[in-house]
Amino acid sequence: MKIWIIDTQTPTHRLVRVKCENQLGYEYLGDLNDNEIREFILSVKEDDVEKNMKLLHYYGYLHLFIIKK
């Protein structure tokens, strides 16, 4: 699956937006298989990876919001 990403970081939070199509302002992450996408999601946020994979496959995008403590 071809993946594009935009990663916005502030002192209080991080928002990672992943899309399956090219969008203005997004950078090409690569052509990743499902295992590589799972590893990427876990590297960004320890969350329900299978749920996030299903959302990405169904909608074609995924937003991961991380609050910095």
Image (tube, rainbow, N blue to C red):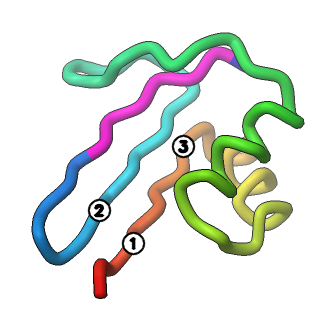
- Say whether marks 2 and 1 touch (CB < 8 Å): yes
The correct choice, above or below, for 8 with respect to 18 in the image is below
Tell me how far mark 3 sits from mark 2, CA to CA. 17 Å
Q: Amino acid at mark 3?
A: Tyr
Secondary structure category for the residue under label 1: strand
Where residue 36 sits, quadrant-wise, is top right
Label 2 environment density (alpha carbons within 10 Å; few <14, some 14–19, many ≥20): some
Label 1 environment density (alpha carbons within 10 Å; few <14, some 14–19, many ≥20): some
Q: Residue 61 or 29: which is nearer the viewer?
A: 29
Secondary structure category for the residue under label 2: strand
Q: Which residue is mark 2?
A: 14
From the image, give the main secondary structure of the stretch colored magenta.
strand
Q: Is residue 13 magenta?
A: no
Tell me how far mark 1 sits from mark 3, CA to CA. 17 Å
Most distant residue in the left direction:
11
Residue 66: which numbered mark, if any?
A: 1
- Say whether marks 1 and 3 touch (CB < 8 Å): no
Span colored in magenta: 2-7
Q: Residue at x 74, y 46 (%)?
A: 58
Mark with earlier residue (1, 3) = 3
Total number of numbered discs in the rendering: 3
Q: Residue at x 61, y 38 (%)?
A: 60
Q: Which residue is mark 3?
A: 61
